[in-house]
Image (cartoon, rainbow, N blue to C red):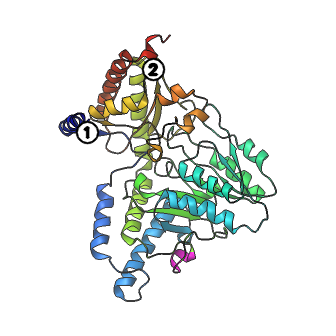
Amino acid sequence: MRVDMAVRIEVIAVVNRFYFDHNATTPVSSEVLAEHIEALREVYGNASSIHHNGQRAKQALEEARRRVAAAIGAESREIVFLSGGTEAGNLAILGVVRASTKLRKHVITSVIEHPAVMNTCAQLEREGVEVTYLPVSPGGVVDPDSVRQTLREDTVLVTLMHANNETGTVQPVEAIGRITREAGIAFHSDGVQAFGKIPVGVNTLGVDLYTISGHKIYAPKGVGALYVRKGTKLVPLLFGGHHERDRRPGTENVPGAVALGCAAAVAVRDLEAESSRLDALRNRLERAILERVPHSGVNGGAVARVPNTTNIYFDGVQGEAMVIALDLAGFAVSTGSACSSGAVEPSHVLTALGLKKERARASLRFSLGRSNTAAQVDALAEAVVEAAGRLRSLSPAYAHHD
């Protein structure tokens, strides 16, 4: 095993590396890095201190807050900085539910949410809260009418993602937002995979809480934001000082917030052009693969998706084996959520779409980003064709495929 690992490391070191796993994380962009480094070097004061250094940090923090708010059409005071998407989702869900004074509490979510939401809802169930997990269509979309029909007198929160991390499927958040507004029920949407890829306006969407993560939009890891509509009742998860309007105690990560503010502004600035470019590249990749690899197809490809994401199945092939084969060829891809890597069970998202376990395990996610080019896409397609053919030739499961 040590020899094999050494050989693999040596191979990885000599091949060109192309990154197609941007839904897992993104590299820090040069624009963001420049502002982040400057803040690390120059803005070292505590934003709660009243001296010059502290006030400089406070100004930088509030400017970052304004930039994030502007990017989603919110007010500055509605933005809470924290450590990332997982903490933001926990604060949104637990904070709203625990703030409710109802004796019985009910939450609505879906069967395809990210683990940050699914496991938070599981915690609520342990606390005695009833959670309804709505099904999705074969394309991976929640029916807004199912939300309306599931609302109850004791419903305190609806939490549904904006875009799925594995398939890229976009949910009808605006339609659901109209329903929750009419019912006077708080609505949280996990926007980690949507913001920076499709237009996001919190007022248009009708959400009361919206989650953003820095490392998905070319900012560093360890910083995120939660939009909390003015008037939304929310209790904190942590206890300490009066930071972030008493919603998230702890000395603020000012350089991280500066980086997130820059990344949010750049994402909005470049959204139209970059989304169009990535959509063309994604479609080019799908055509190249589907035309040359039989018994393959796109999961969730018949509905609206974010432009950078495709999830493709390769019957008769183990997805993990394909990931390794492509990694050795110099391409970083994944089988789904990075937060679920190492899981024995197939993707809960793909099985919720109706895929059999074998096909779900034979699926790969390709998520494109700013660094990808047409030449890289073509090279990836060639590598996929070669890897699928080679692995299928070794697969007893594919030997008798129709």
**Residue pushed farthest right?**
153
Which segment did they paint magenta?
240-246
Q: Please tell me the numbered disc located at residue 341.
A: none
List the residue tagged with mark 1. Answer: 17
User: What percent of the width, then of the height, locates residue 64?
Assistant: 43, 69
Q: Is residue 149 left or right of residue 86?
A: right
Visible in this render: residue 326? yes
**SS of the residue at dot 2?**
loop
List the residue tagged with mark 2. Answer: 316
Task: Name the image quarter holding the N terminus.
Answer: top left
Residue 402 counted in the magenta span: no
Q: Quadrant of residue 369?
A: top left
Q: Quadrant of residue 54?
A: bottom left
User: What percent of the width, then of the height, locates residue 276?
Assistant: 43, 40
In this view, 334 is above or below 95 = above
Q: CA distance from mark 1 to mark 2?
A: 27 Å
**Residue pushed farthest bottom?**
51
In this view, 242 is above or below 112 = below
Residue at 53% from the left image edge and 80% from the top image edge: 242
Residue at 64% from the left image edge and 69% from the top image edge: 234
In this view, 363 is above or below 255 = above
How packed mark 2 is, by other alpha carbons closer than 10 Å (few <14, some 14-19, many 20 or more), is many
